[in-house]
Image (tube, helix red, strand yellow):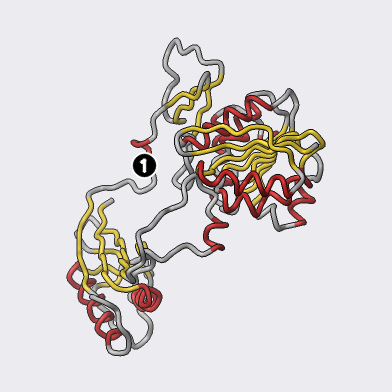
Amino acid sequence: MKWVRFRIKTNTDAEDIIISDLYDIGLEGAQIEDKVPLSPLDKEKMFVDILPDPDDDDGTAFLNFFVEAGDDGLLLLGGEPEPGTMTIGAANTAGDIRKVSKDEVLSMIEEALSDIKSYMDIGEGTVEVSETEDIDWLNNWKKYFTSFEVDDILVIPSWEQVPEGDTHKYILHIDPGTAFGTGMHDTTQLCIRNIKKYVKEGSKILDIGTGSGILGILGLMFGAGFAYGTDLDPCAEEAVRENLENNNISPDRFRLVIGNIASDESLQADAGKGEYDIVVANILAEVLEGITPSVPVMLKKGGVYITSGILNEKESIVTDAMERAGLTVLDISRQGEWSSVVSRKD
């Protein structure tokens, strides 16, 4: 596919109104770039290895709109204009797509921006137009993911073949999808090593913020009997399903539920209280602080809580939260600037 990008330089106050007005002319999605600090709720929802660290917010924002170009060079705009609004270009036979030229789209954008300028400050309000050549948006990221090793574990993309003569005991085929990590990050590797260290035959694992399912799946490969994963992102469902299939693991052994187990008592009841030998959470120190009070409820007596995603200088945030929850800190391991803290329910 070929795409044309319309990049608008504006300010954060005008983001929503510009997106809304351009939606009315058929630009149905926007990629937003700004430096607005993350709210506590934003951070809570980000079950990721590394929290973005933006520069100081100067109020500047960029809105990127991508429009597909047909073989005839015309751009394909979604939807029909609202009654009484400008109609430019010929309607496509599909009825809900319009074909317009690049210049016509630019003219519509500039007219919309001019209207908005009449009643509010939109900053520079400039528009930059660029083209891309045949980008496969869903698969282009794959060129950055190659196989890697964690001790005696080979993590390999699902679309690659295991090298002939490979002697690794554990081979994990993984397709993280576009929404989740690959396991290459230090924090994930710290969790992998600790799961392998503490798992026993038949263990039950609770993986909070499971993402693509890497930790729960490896736990099953190391001998655990069952894994229960939770995540806030519905994209995790497809990622986990595919990765279970890639590694020939029965879906009966891994249950995934979308939701926040730290605050949702119905989700805690569904998972089962006091049932887990291992609870693992590879998130961020600030998020772990909020999750930790609910962890003892889920653990068996003697069960262990494995955490990572913790910058070295923030270890005390997690260890203090564990101690307040009545857990005993067993071990702290580090890799690069990151730490993993393990505790036990006595």
Q: Which residue is mark 1?
A: 141
Q: Is residue 173 visible?
A: yes
Foreground residue among 161 and 291: 291
Instruction: State the SS at label 1.
Output: helix
Choose top left, top right, bottom left or bottom right for residue 127.
bottom left
The three-letter code of the residue at mark 1 reads Trp
Quarter occupied by the C terminus: top right
| 175 horizontally vs 79: left or right | right
The residue lying furthest to the left in this view is 103
Foreground residue among 118 and 78: 118
- Residue 265 position, x and y percent, is 76, 56
| 255 horizontally vs 215: left or right | right
> Going 52% across and 36% down the picture, which residue do you hit?
188
- Residue 134 position, x and y percent, is 26, 47
- Residue 9 position, x and y percent, is 26, 69
| 144 horizontally vs 186: left or right | left
- Residue 287 position, x and y percent, is 59, 53
Relative to 321, residue 102 above or below:
below
Foreground residue among 76 and 285: 285
Q: How many marks?
A: 1
Choose top left, top right, bottom left or bottom right for residue 7.
bottom left
